[in-house]
Amino acid sequence: MDFKLTDEQRLFKEQVLKFARKEIVPRVQEHELAAKFDFESWRKLGEFGVLGLHFPEKFGGSGADVITCVLAGEALGEAGVDGGLTLSYGAHSFLCADTIYAHGNDAQREKYLPKLITGEWIGCMGLTEPGAGSDVAALRTRAEKVDGGYRLTGSKMFITNGSIADVAVIYAKTDPKAGHAGISAFIVEKGTPGFTVSKNLHKMGVRTSPTSELAFDNCFVPAENLIGFEGAGFLMSMQTVEWDRSALLAPMLGSLQYVMEKCLRYAQEREQFGRPIAAFPAIKHKIANLKIVLEAARPLIYRIAWCKDQGKPLSHLEAAIAKLFIADWSLAPLNDAVILHGGYGYCHEYDVERVLRDSRLAPIGGGTSDIQKMIISKLMAGGGA
Amino acid sequence: MNYERNEHEQAWLDAVKPLKGQLETLKADSSSEEWGQAALSCIRALQARDPKTPDWRPDLGVVVALMDLSTVSASVGMAWLVQRLAVQLAQTLETSEWAEAAESFKAGENLVALAIGPTDATLTIQADGSARLTGVWECVPNAAAAERLLAIVQGDEGPELVSIDAKAVGVALSQTASSLMGSADIRAEDVAIAADCRAAFKASSDLRRAWNLGLAAVATGLMRHAMAVLQGFSAVAKEGAKPLAADQNVRYTLAELLTRVQTAELFVARAAWLGREGDFEAETVGMAVKAFVSDEVQTVTTIVHQIAGRAAGGRGGFFTQALSEAATLAVSGTTADKARSAIADDLLARYEV
């Protein structure tokens, strides 16, 4: 085994870190408090190349490997970029644009990818429904085949970027009796008649990332907007898991480092009982716990990225373990980081409570921790441990 | 980056494989003699693979092999770890007597115990350079079956490594009630130490790092062992008419246990790799992995013990033995408490305001 990053990978991470600290972080609090998407930062992410890192150069991307994408996400979190913006980036690049790139045809790639990569267009992915989350087979949104295309009817829930997206990848059932094999994926553009944002949701964390309920009322989608072929949707959605468990989780790794550095600074500056609180063992242990979880989680996340880079089939066991660990094990140290800051920790200006709130999406989004345990236990029973 | 085992690591795992089969006959209530023979047999086979001049930097092949061996017997994993460290310590001393001892330890001619922990031992130096040693060491791994004891004690001019014949007059062993198999308390009462059995001890940092990483590897193996035993147990043990594994909570708990195990395995491997590379983070990550695994091995064995319920209650059974082994491993080397302090001190120095 070898855990070495290339010089190029390390250098790029440093560059993203510097860029994010200078260009994005100063704008975070204003937008986070107002729960507003930061279009200016989005544009800058596109200009810097973050939004299209792994796509081929012919579409405007950089052709980077998955490890580099993970490092970029880690650098954003480490800089102090909020979980809302990094979530929007993940949903846009990995759940929407990558699905078009990996499964779409040339015409779809050429039409959508260049604008998604620059950030001129924003993408989203619609899978979850009010009655179907992790149980994908229970989807109710229907795509009925009609002359020249499909008519979509149904609704989608908890859709990241839903209200700001120009392009949506929507999963719907073309054959309701076929279970997983009856699910297909479609590209639906903003403004398509019958496609509306029915509600924006107010959330505990990741507040700069709009989360919406989408409605499809007899919405006509032309046949050329079908991604891949009918019935291929479930497998497409499963392939996004590789991104979900690597690049999408990477900002959390960075956030642990960000919070740890905040704690280190505060603990040295804040004095109580005549000395900096960093002198107290109980405070030291809180800081150490952040480092321990960060270092324990890092190889789990990198492993998923490395496997994807090698073209290996995703190990659902390893993916579920990575997600379960960082989601559940980060709670206590991040909570302690708020407590370490005392009253200031509970206030916005120190930004540690924001990270705690943002991090609470991890045990829920992309499959709850219970779902990860279900996956792990099933695979264990099948001898996959 | 490469998460696959290379040929060197795989060769070590291949070497461990047949030994694991042999060790399955070892039971929690096996005698010290049976345990010692089994441990020596493994040590001989594994030491034969070791290079002639081992260095203190972690060998990832050895670390994965140590984890794997410990999935069958943590105490035998510990025995090998101790024997390797004894070889390395003896080799640092550069005298013919110690070089001879190192060869003997390496060949597995006899089992060595290593008393590293805190002690109130006193070494009284005689005019001819020999010394008299008095002291007590608790819960020393390998001590129950060892022929030679290595102890680090405070001499007149700093710490010294002393080599003691386990059968020497004044040396007494007593089995610890609940600990790793093969370990024992050592009492030395005015024991004569020849001049050529003493040497200045200068490898404290190297020894501490290697000891901590080795302990984390052994504890990680024990975690996987405990989880695997529970997995098997829950498939056959019944509550009412159904096997325990039919309970969703048991299944999800097993999933959590595997998460702890796999995380620890990768964490140990990466810490070893960083040490090998001489990375600036190696010291901190080494402490982090020791703290993490010390906590997790106790959590895992406690959960396993609780789910096994009444079946876990019997003395001498695996579940009870695993609990006490986990506790011993956790308090050996740098404890989680001290490791956390060391991590924070290192970070505070690096991020000084």
Image (cartoon, coloured by chain):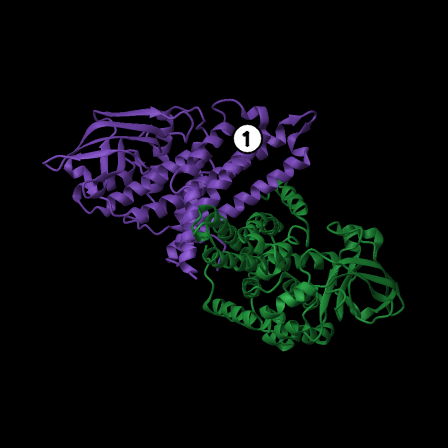
Question: Which corner quadrant of the image does residue A243 belong to?
Answer: bottom right
Q: On the rendered image, what quadrant is the C terminus of chain B found in?
A: bottom left
Residue A155 at x, y percent in the picture: 83, 58
Q: Residue furthest left?
A: B128
Query: At 61% across and 38% down in the image, what residue appears?
Result: B253
Q: Is residue B53 left or right of residue A383?
A: left
Which chain identifier belongs to the green chain? A
* Direction from residue B348 to residue A71 in the image, left or right: right
Q: Chain of mark 1?
A: B
Amino acid residing under circle 1: His
Residue toward you, A147 or B324? B324
Question: Which residue, as the protein is rendered here, is positioned at the far front?
Answer: A274
Q: Is residue A54 above or below residue B73?
A: below
- Give me the chain that's purple: B
The kind of secondary structure element at disc 1 is: helix
Residue at numbered disc 1 = B305
Q: Position of residue A111 (x, y in %)?
A: 73, 76
Camera sees residue A155: yes
Q: Residue at x 63, y 76 (%)?
A: A60
Residue B129 x/y as whole percent: 12, 38
User: Which residue corresponds to the image point at 42% horizontal and 34% vertical from the top-left?
Assistant: B328
Compare residues B31 and B158 and report the one nearer the observer: B158
User: Is residue B19 visible from the viewing direction of this image?
Assistant: no
Label 1 CA crowd tier, 10 Å (few <14, some 14–19, many 20+): many
